[in-house]
Image (spheres, rainbow, N blue to C red):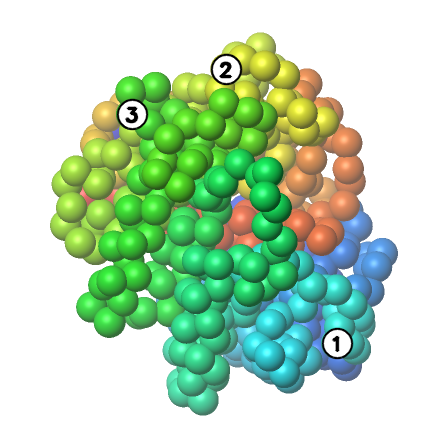
Amino acid sequence: MDQLKISGYLDKFEHELFESVLPFWETHSPDFENGGFYNCLDRQGKVYDTRKHVWLQGRQTWMFSKLYRNVERNPNWLKLAKNGADFLLNKTLTENDRVYFAVNEQGKGLWMQRKIFSECFWIMALAEYSRASGDKSYLQHTERLFKKVWEWSKDLSKVGQPTYEGAEPLVQLAIPMILLNLIEEVAGANFSEFETQINECIDRVMLHVHPARQLVFEQVAPNGEFVNNMDGRLLNPGHASEAGWFLQHWAGHTKNAELSKTAINMVRWSHDKGWDDEYGGLYYFLDSEGHSPTQLEWNMKLWWPHTEAMYAHLLNYSITKDESDFKKFEQVVDYSFTHFSDAEYGEWFGYLSREGKRTHHFKGGPYKGCFHVPRALYLCWQLLSKLESDPQL
């Protein structure tokens, strides 16, 4: 690989992260009066809805905590992180340790999902802020809640999800993959304390990986078998790429060569299946048997699958040194920076039609916040830095 090319991408990602994306959130999102962050921001950063979505509060708190701890002890980053951490701790947790999905501007509860994802990002945020700030009291709260989330993840009726007699039993990829990521963030260097949970999550993710068909399914039967209905046939190329790099991190932690090969293939398969050869970009959803997905947005191009694929392909290349992995990285980077990045006002647009035309102009909403874009840019920037300094990495 031409080292000048690596250096060029390093400069590109550094500029995008530190001069475009982060300043957008630093400038427009903080609410120091009520605590937390405004996450519903239009193209220019103006607040168009003051409701706060808690999983995004957690993600943004985690992001600035991570940057402060690993990049630079920037006092403004720590101030932002504390603003988020205190809001999460004091305003968003119920008496029975559930976390709201959304609260009002002042932090009063609005609604709660029958899922565990708000709790996961609450835990991630406070764990990382605890390490960034050195205040161990925040970490104590995460230990208590993690035990409950682990229990809930195995029986979602405990968070209010109903079960019906005629329902096809299915398990979701999203749960074990997010728990793997959560454990990586919470454990720090003490992975041995979570060995049982780590192995179980890896096994649960692997149920969704079908090597014979080179597919990663969103939902499968509890034993991993393919289910031939619209839920069982669902593919999400972005999720599969994200799950792939989560597994690759654990393959590195555990020195598991076979798991590493599987993770590499998950990312490659998802790109080969999910890339739109006519218009470019990754489809949001696909049906494994070629039927039309029932999700109306199935052929849209969303920001987050592309950010996850960028890092996943670069991580693959860092391991394989296979030029085809780097070409996939370049393909996704070129599409993403051309279509999503906003050179005028900073940050990225989130939603495009299949043809690549913007369908929404806001930069933040209930599902898009300060997370996928800066996280991927940060991870790629870190990895490119290593590749520049040590081409044999």
Vertical relation: 19 (above or below) 10: below
Q: Earlier in the sequence, mark 1 or mark 3?
A: 1
Image depth: mark 1 or mark 3 in front: 3
Kind of residue sitting beneath label 2: Glu
Percent x, y of residue 375: 48, 52
Report x, y in % for residue 145: 48, 75
Please tell me whether residue 249 is drawn above or below residue 327 in the rendered image. below
**Above or below, 360 relative to 180:** above
Residues marked 1 and 3 touching at CB (< 8 Å)? no
Residue at 41 percent across and 73 percent down: it is 147
Query: Where does label 1 land, which residue?
Result: 107
Q: Quadrant of residue 119?
A: bottom right
Label 1 environment density (alpha carbons within 10 Å; few <14, some 14–19, many ≥20): many
**In the drawing, what numbered circle is on residue 289?**
2
Q: Secondary structure at mark 2?
A: loop
Q: Determine which quarter of the picture holds residue 262.
A: top left
Res 91 visible? yes
Amino acid on which disc 1 is placed: Gly
Nearer-the-camera pick, 254 or 340: 254
Which of disc 3 and disc 2 is earlier in sequence?
A: 3
* Quadrant of the snapshot with the N terminus: top left
Q: Name which residue lies at 30% across and 29% down.
A: 265
Task: Say which residue label 3 marks.
Answer: 211
The secondary structure type at the circle numbered 1 is loop
Residue at 46% from the left image edge and 43% from the top image edge: 171
Crowdedness near tag 3: few (<14), some (14–19) or many (≥20) residues, C-alpha within 10 Å? few
Instruction: Name the amino acid type tagged 3.
Output: Pro
